[in-house]
Amino acid sequence: MNGSGKNRILFLMENGLFYPQDSIAALATPWGESALAVIRVSGTGSLGLLDSLFRPASPSLDGLQSAEGHTIHRGAIAVSAPGQQSETVDEVLVAVYRGPRSFTGEDGAEVFCHGSPLIVRRVLGLLAERGFRFAGPGEFTLRAFLNGKLDLTQAEAVNELVRAKSDRARAIALNRLSGAIEQTIERIKQTVVRLSAAIELGLDYGEDEIEAGDGLAEDREAARCQEELERLLATYRIGRLYQEGISVVLAGRTNSGKSTLFNRMLREDRAIVSEVHGTTRDYLEAVVILEEVPIRLYDTAGFRERAEGVEAEGMRRTDSIVANADLILYLVDGETGLTDQDREFLRARAGAGRTIPVWNKIDTGQTGCPEGFVAVSAREGRGLESLSRRIAEKVLEGAGSVDAGEPIIDSLRQKGLLERALAGIRDFRAGLSGGQPLDVLAVDLKEALDALGEITGEVTSQDILNQIFSRFCVGK
Ligand SMILES: Nc1nc2c(ncn2[C@@H]2O[C@H](COP(=O)(O)OP(=O)(O)OP(=O)(O)O)[C@@H](O)[C@H]2O)c(=O)[nH]1
Ligand SMILES: [Mg+2]
């Protein structure tokens, strides 16, 4: 394939679901039928190539190549072999985009065709024959970045938006997509640049160090940068919380009602419930959203003294899930009351603050709920609201608070770079008060500037780009 052909990419998106296919052959795997499929193409010359397959319904359209940006055209995907009548593959709509006013910044199109796998495979095959190839993960966004449509924090936000599991996570990602982080970084950077210029000026005049008492204004500016960086860094925990969520495990002795509570929280009859001890053998996993926080909820095999074979293996799995969980809901059967095993479990974890003890089956009339337990009836759905509140309290504990509209980071990459920038600023301030020579101070500021530039992608390397975009779904 020639070089310009490589430049054109295509992708298939069906009902909002992404199919990471990297070859046409992979499409032999059937997937569910759907009403609509969207095939995106982007790149120099892509409209011309697509045009060779497109027969417009309206004779007034000269072809996609002459179509303006942000227009949509009805027609058919059709092929004609020499000497034969042309064959219509599907009736479609084609949305035309023109660079630079397109998502990628390049010319491109979206083909809306009927969602049958047969049709999609056929159209993709035809496009591939004409020189298109499949897009890599995040390649559309990578191109948008390379063409200056987005900075790196916005590119990362695209992925976060696609993956957002709760409304809050969506709002945070959307804020980032609008450039909120970039603007904050830009502001800090300008201050650092001003500071650097002042130091450079001193160096130009042949000074070695700042006279005692002279660096006050510089220190004040640096302190402001430091504060802003610290504030942004502090939002990381909350950002992670809403984007990634936490894991919560239901643990307790057999028959305490874990599976019943699991089903209640899911509002779905997922786990088998029975009065037989040891009903749940393997763990079950599901995602629920609680107070806007995505929660991976686990139902586990119950504890009991004598467990053998499959059940013993189930308990080993329970142990490992419990050990790794962010939060444990420990259920006690109120009817049988606390056993030694319960006491031991709760005592062992009392200090860790990761456990909420739950007293179940309050509908049976028993009244022995000990202090500190949340009283519920999983069967009747009583007490679930206070349980949710307790979970939310625990989850948000220590995550800090943020103002509405404040930029929130949630990328480990951004966090690492912010820390580097912060270290540079701190070193600069320490050096300033310690009477360090100007060239040392200049190096500290340079370090901070480099880190800030990497956050927005001003300075970047192929490795970093690969790392970021490989985490994307194909098609974004
Ligand atoms: N009365 C009453 N019975 C309950 C309640 N919750 C669960 N049960 C009953 O207790 C029995 C055990 O419930 P499960 O949810 O299967 O208990 P489990 O903890 O998952 O048990 P294992 O999977 O064996 O560890 C079932 O007969 C449930 O119907 C409740 O709130 N009140
Ligand atoms: Mg169970």
Image (cartoon, rainbow, N blue to C red):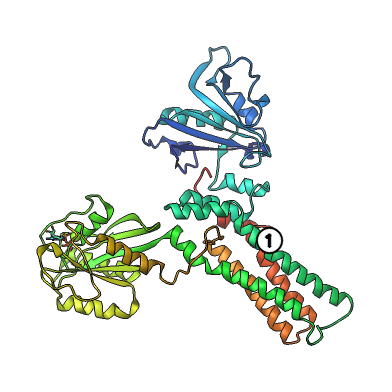
Residue position for label 1: 186
Q: Quadrant of residue 54?
A: top right
Q: Quadrant of residue 109?
A: top right
Q: Position of residue 3 (x, y in %)?
A: 67, 39
Q: Residues within 10 Å of mark 1 (few under 14, many from 20)?
A: some
Estimate the x, y position of residue 348 in percent, counting from the top left.
27, 80
Is 243 or 304 nearer to us in this picture?
243
| Whether residue 85 is situated above or below residue 112 in the rendered picture | above
Which quarter of the picture shows residue 397?
bottom left
Q: Amino acid at mark 1?
A: Glu
Residue in the image at 77% along x and 81% along y: 215
Q: Is residue 246 left or right of residue 90?
A: left
Q: Say whether residue 255 is visible.
A: no
Q: Residue furthest right?
A: 205
Instruction: Please give the name of the residue rendered at 14% of the width and 69% of the height, measured from the top-left corner.
Output: 334
Position of 99 with respect to 404 (left or right) is right
Q: Total marks drawn?
A: 1
In percent of width and height, residue 90 lies at: 48, 22
| Residue beneath the point at 26% across and 51% down | 267
Mark 1 residue element: helix
Q: Observer-nearest residue: 436 or 166?
A: 166
- Image quadrant of ligand 1 equals bottom left
With respect to residue 256, does 126 lie above or below? above
Residue 111 percent location from the top left of the image: 53, 30
Quarter of the figure that contains the N terminus: top right
Residue 409 visible (yes or no): yes
Residue drawn at point x = 15 percent, y = 59 percent: 279
